[in-house]
Amino acid sequence: MTTKLPTGFGRLWTAQTVSSLGDGVTHAALPLLAVTLTRDPMALAVVTAAGTLPWLLFGVLGGALVDRWDRRRTMWVTDAARAVLLAVPAAAAALDVLSIPLLAASAFLLALGGLFFDTAATAYLPDLLRRDPALLQRANARLRGAQTAASGFAGPPAGSALLALGRSVPLLADAVSFALSALLVRSLPAVPRPAAGARESLLRQARAGAAYVFKDRLLLGLALRPAVGNVAFLAVETILALFAHERLGVGALGFGLLLTAEAAGGLLGAGIAAFLGRRLGTGTALTCTATIEGLAILGLASAPDAYAAGLALAVCGAGMGATMVLGPSLRQAIVPAHLMGRVASTSRMLAMCAAPFGAFLGGWLATTYDLRTPLYAAAGLLLAMTAVTATMTSNRRVEAALRAARPPAGQDPAEELAVHTASG
């Protein structure tokens, strides 16, 4: 019999869906706002890279803090702060004093809030679902599906449309979404959480989390995939608005529809992730989805028109959607609760540290060569990464890790959590 997801998950799902809709609005509007200020690819790369720097500077320490703090409170306070923050660029846009430095600073601070929110949410979910692997996969599929539908399928066209009403309107819409998310998250049920190690320094706790990832080949393989992938995807994202405008001949609405095509694929990928995991095994499924992503970017680079580009983005989105369900679900099922925040933030930090390099690589290749070159380079990186990490995330390693993570027969997951808490 299928176990039912708890009521609290519904509120978490609603909160993240609302916030993701606002993110989708900003995701489309921010590069379009930047393009109204400059056509310099390197200046656009600065805005893109700024949104990844918090993970480079504070990623591991942020995870250690999340493992000390109340995770529910961390989520709602962060979203409330981001709602207030967005008022600054919105006011600047309304007063016609918006600039690239202000957009970059806003992207940095929003991403800093995202660091704490995402890490806390990742650590909160396995506690809420009692670390049940099947429930985690179902929950992540629903979260990823809703996030993809809201931030990619509905948000980008809405962002493009709202931008036509005024440059501040999309930013205000995202602020409202953060405020609503904060209210919903605040109503979530409390869950048991590990206490911080007694008198243990923050830096020492952060190092312990990072070491846990680097010493485990499966976790390292799961972390390397998005790290290399982010180099590729940020190289593409940095020049995508210009590529759509200059090579495909589409305007703001067309650009929003291209992002929607990618999101539609992501929604499909999230929906079939569990099926792929059952039929192929999680390890093999992850290798297949990574290969699909690389081939899809190659198709985007050679697309003759907007229709072919939309299809390529949809296929890439499907691969990404399935990957983002299978990978995090596996990590949440095998990592001890008292390390979850640090392991999650270390893995995310590796991915995000690579992203600024990808953003500047995309800008440099586009400036030095042409707008298709970053896409060809991104496809090559994705396919090379797939070959390197295939054995690290094999089905054999996955099954061994799941067996090792299961509590002894008769032990309740809450009891296991208490043991880890007591041991520091």
Image: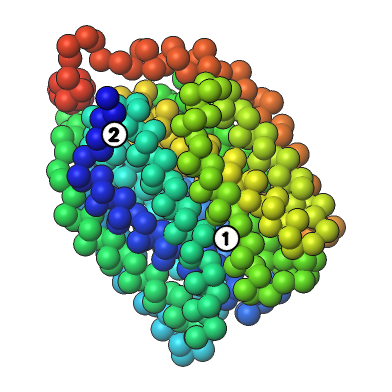
The amino acid at mark 1 is: Thr
Q: Mark 1 packing: few (<14 Cα in 10 Å), some, or many (20+)?
A: many
Circle number at residue 126: 2
Q: Secondary structure at mark 2?
A: helix
Residue lying furthest front in this view? 1
Which is nearer the eye, 289 or 108?
A: 289
Asked if one can make out residue 190 in the rendered structure from this viewpoint, the answer is: yes
The residue most toward the top is: 409
Q: Is residue 172 left or right of residue 246?
A: left
Q: Quadrant of the C terminus?
A: top left
Mark 1 or mark 2: which comes first in sequence? Answer: 2
Residue bearing the label numbered 1: 260
What residue is rendered at 37% in x and 23% in y?
Answer: 334
Report, in whole angstroms, how far the alpha carbon at label 1 lies from the one at label 2.
Answer: 30 Å
Residue 93 lies, in percent from the top left, at 48, 83
Q: Quadrant of residue 175?
A: bottom left
**SS at circle 1:** helix
Please, which colouring scheme is shown? Answer: rainbow
Q: Position of residue 289 (x, y in %)?
A: 61, 34
Residue 54 seen by the camera? no
Q: Residue at x 30, y 56 (%)?
A: 15
Q: Residue at x 50, y 82 (%)?
A: 167
Looking at the rendered structure, the number of numbered marks drawn on it comes to 2
Quarter-wise, where is residue 181 in the image?
bottom left
The nearer-to-camera label among 1 and 2 is 1
